[in-house]
């Protein structure tokens, strides 16, 4: 499991949460490929976790749009479609502007410190693709906690997984040093309570995502 996620992956996590983390990582990193058909039994074997927690994880991943439940056929990994991703990025732009502003206003002292540490770690990820993806997932989690609005965090959670999958799918086209710089800048701006700076960094991240979506040439 990604080290940046594993730091918060402790004994208090439920089996369903563990199953979700493991499966979400496989979906985002394309180990479970877009369009692939897969059975519940396969996911149980993938995680080493029992049927009931895995079913809970499947329900959550389905709600987030990463898995599709096909009646009497099993499960399908949701294909990457340009038309869907355009709408996902469109929604994320509006909601996440609110999130970063509220996180800059409301973050607790320990959350600001965690964001500063994360900003420093992004500076070391300019040539490490796997670490960048791990840190981006950690940033999503920290912002979701720091905004202290679970409704907003829940609404954005589905877009984050989809966007991380896009980052990974288009990793050959990604300017990694620039992406790491922008994410580090966002982390630092929120930590410093700079809502305007956070929005500027976020807007550049969203523009990068839009460029990756526009670069998709094989999907509808």
Image (cartoon, rainbow, N blue to C red):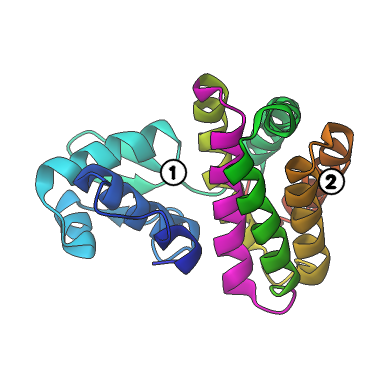
Where residue 136 appears, x then y in whole percent?
62, 56
Q: Work out whether 140 lies above or below 71.
A: below
Quarter residue 2 falls in: bottom left
Q: Residues within 10 Å of mark 1 (few under 14, many from 20)?
A: many
Q: Earlier in the sequence, mark 1 or mark 2?
A: 1
Q: Which residue is at 75% across, 74% downward?
A: 126
Point out the image quarter for the N terminus: bottom left
- Across and down, in percent, residue 53 comes to 17, 43
Alpha-carbon span between mark 1 and mark 2? 27 Å
42 drawn magenta: no
Residue placed most toward the observer, 154 or 219: 154
Q: Quadrant of residue 189?
A: top right
Of residues 203 and 12, the one drawn nearer to the viewer in this rendering = 12
Q: State the mark number for residue 66.
A: 1
Within 10 Å of disc 2 (Cα), the crowding (few <14, some 14-19, many 20+) is many
Give the number of the mark in front: 1 or 2.
2
At 23% from the left and 44% from the top, the residue drawn is 14
**Predominant SS along the magenta part:** helix
Query: Residue 152: where, in percent of width, then height?
Result: 57, 23
**Magenta-span inclusion, residue 143:** yes
Q: Which residue is mark 2?
A: 201
Q: Please report the bounds of the magenta region as a residue range.
A: 126-150
The label on residue 211 is none
Q: 133 or 187: which is nearer to us?
A: 187
Report the front residue among 10 and 128. 10
The secondary structure type at the circle numbered 2 is helix
Above or below residue 188? Residue 65 is: above
Residue 201 lies, in percent from the top left, at 84, 46
Residue drawn at point x = 39 percent, y = 61 percent: 32
């Amino acid at each position: 499991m990604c080290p940046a996620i594993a730091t918060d992956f402790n004994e208090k996590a439920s089996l369903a949460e563990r199953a979700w983390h493991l499966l979400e990582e496989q979906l985002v990193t394309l180990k479970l490929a877009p369009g692939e058909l897969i059975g519940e039994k396969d996911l149980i074997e993938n995680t080493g976790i029992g049927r009931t927690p895995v079913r809970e994880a499947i329900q959550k991943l389905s709600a987030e749009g990463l898995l599709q439940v096909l009646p009497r056929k099993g499960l399908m990994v949701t294909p990457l479609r340009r038309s869907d991703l355009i709408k996902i990025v469109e929604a994320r732009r509006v909601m996440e502007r609110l999130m970063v502003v509220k996180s800059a206003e409301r973050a607790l002292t320990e959350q600001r410190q965690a964001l500063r540490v994360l900003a420093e770690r992004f500076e070391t990820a300019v040539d490490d693709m796997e670490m960048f993806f791990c840190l981006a997932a950690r940033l999503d989690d920290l912002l979701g906690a720091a905004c202290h609005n679970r409704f907003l965090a829940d609404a954005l959670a589905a877009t984050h997984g989809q966007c991380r999958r896009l980052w990974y799918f288009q990793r050959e086209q990604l300017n990694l040093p620039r992406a790491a710089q922008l994410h580090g800048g966002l982390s630092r701006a929120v930590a410093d309570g700079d809502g305007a700076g956070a929005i500027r960094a976020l807007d550049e991240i969203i523009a990068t995502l839009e460029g990756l979506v526009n670069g998709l040439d094989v999907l509808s």
